[in-house]
Image: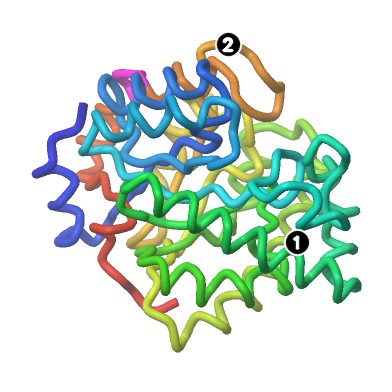
């Protein structure tokens, strides 16, 4: 486990790296992997799904692990809602689940005023459930990155600040580096990089009058579910920005080839990763300790 002194030292370092585990609370296998990656590896923070089936267990584990920074993993697609269906009937199915396809959900949020009103209620409910845990709110990010959808982001900013978040993720990955590592899913990577890059540029323009910290570079989008050790080593040896986030999907069992998986956990536990961090004089950070730079 990383010492508090090492994490706090991040505020003085020109090269700060947040290492985050997504989907905390979704399943016991993910909860176990996140805690192990923090205690035995290099993971510094995690993002909590407040309607996940293993949410209560995740909260208890986080309360017992004070050095682990915990943020909100906003779920407005491909997951369970907090509010009952009667309160958000245009957003969820009979089981209270959002549609799985982000494009379908994005169009709904973009063009339906009724859906937008229900979305605002559900987002507030997820922040409120997080606050009820008593855990400090480190940051905010989103499942399938829908937190950067313009209709979502405009509602997210005041909520994040009002509930005391320190920062949020804008998933701007380095396309060239990912393609040089391997050409698998090349068309998909190019599409995601261009589309999310344009949206993130718009989001950054809305952040100038806000106090939230945003890492200048993020890695994890284009190698989602496949954050292999060799790739992460190359990323850490070639950081271009003072502040960076790497996000992973660790799990003790394979849940999704492009999502929670044991391979990401293995990388987070690798001694080679720890050695590279030390060799490069990188400081492991969390959103609360991140030194702010212009967005």
**Magenta stretch in the rendered image:** 269-273
Whether the magenta-drawn stretch holds residue 90 is answered as no
In the rendered structure, the answer to whether residue 62 lies left or right of residue 162 reads: left
Residue at image position (28%, 60%) is 290
Residue drawn at x 38%, y 63% is: 165
Tag on residue 150? none
What residue lies at 50% left-to-right and 25% top-to-bottom? 250
Q: Residues within 10 Å of mark 2 (few under 14, many from 20)?
A: some
State the residue in front, 204 or 69. 69
Quadrant holding the N terminus: top left
Q: Position of residue 91 (x, y in %)?
A: 83, 54
Give the SS element for disc 2.
Answer: loop
Q: Quadrant of the C terminus?
A: bottom left
| Quadrant of residue 243 within the rendered picture | bottom left
Q: Is residue 188 above or below residue 171?
A: above
User: Is 72 or 205 nearer to us in this picture?
Assistant: 72
The quarter holding residue 147 reads bottom right
Whether residues under marks 2 and 1 lie with C-beta atoms below 8 angstroms apart, the answer is no
Q: Secondary structure at mark 1?
A: helix
Which residue is denoted by mark 1 in the rendering? 194
In the rendering, at what x and y percent does residue 95 appear? 81, 35
Front position among marks 2 and 1? 2
Say which quarter of the image contains residue 88.
bottom right
Q: CA distance from mark 2 to mark 1?
A: 32 Å
Q: Is residue 270 magenta?
A: yes
- To which residue does mark 2 refer? 253
Quick check: 7 above or below 254? below
Per the picture, the main secondary structure of the magenta-coloured stretch is helix
Is 61 placed left or right of 108 in the picture? left
Q: In the image, is 25 to the left or to the right of 39?
A: right
Q: Residue furthest left?
A: 5
């Amino acid at each position: 486990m990383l010492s508090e002194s090492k994490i706090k030292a991040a505020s003085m370092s020109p090269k700060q790296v947040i290492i985050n585990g997504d989907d905390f609370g979704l399943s016991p296998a993910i909860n176990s992997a996140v805690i192990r990656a923090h205690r035995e590896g290099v993971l510094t923070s995690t993002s909590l799904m407040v309607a996940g089936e293993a949410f209560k267990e995740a909260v208890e584990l986080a309360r017992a692990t004070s050095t682990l920074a915990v943020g909100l993993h906003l779920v407005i697609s491909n997951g369970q809602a907090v509010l009952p269906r009667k309160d958000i009937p245009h957003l969820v199915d009979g089981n209270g689940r959002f549609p799985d396809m982000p494009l379908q959900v994005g169009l709904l949020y973009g063009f339906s005023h009724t859906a937008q009103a229900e979305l605002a209620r559900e987002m507030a409910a997820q922040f409120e459930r997080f606050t009820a845990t008593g855990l400090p709110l480190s940051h905010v990010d989103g499942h399938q990155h829908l937190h950067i959808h313009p209709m979502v982001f405009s509602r997210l900013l005041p909520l994040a600040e009002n509930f005391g978040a320190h920062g949020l993720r804008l998933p701007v990955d380095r396309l060239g580096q990912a393609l040089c590592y391997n050409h698998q899913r090349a068309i998909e990577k190019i599409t995601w990089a261009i589309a999310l890059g344009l949206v993130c540029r718009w989001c950054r323009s809305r952040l100038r009058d806000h106090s939230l910290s945003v890492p200048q570079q993020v890695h994890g989008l284009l190698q989602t579910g496949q954050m292999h050790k060799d790739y992460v080593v190359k990323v850490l040896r070639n950081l271009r920005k003072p502040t960076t986030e790497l996000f992973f999907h660790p799990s003790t069992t394979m849940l999704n080839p492009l999502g929670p998986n044991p391979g990401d956990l293995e990388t987070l536990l690798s001694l080679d990763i720890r050695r590279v961090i030390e060799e490069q004089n990188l400081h492991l950070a969390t959103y609360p300790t991140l030194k702010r730079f212009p967005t």
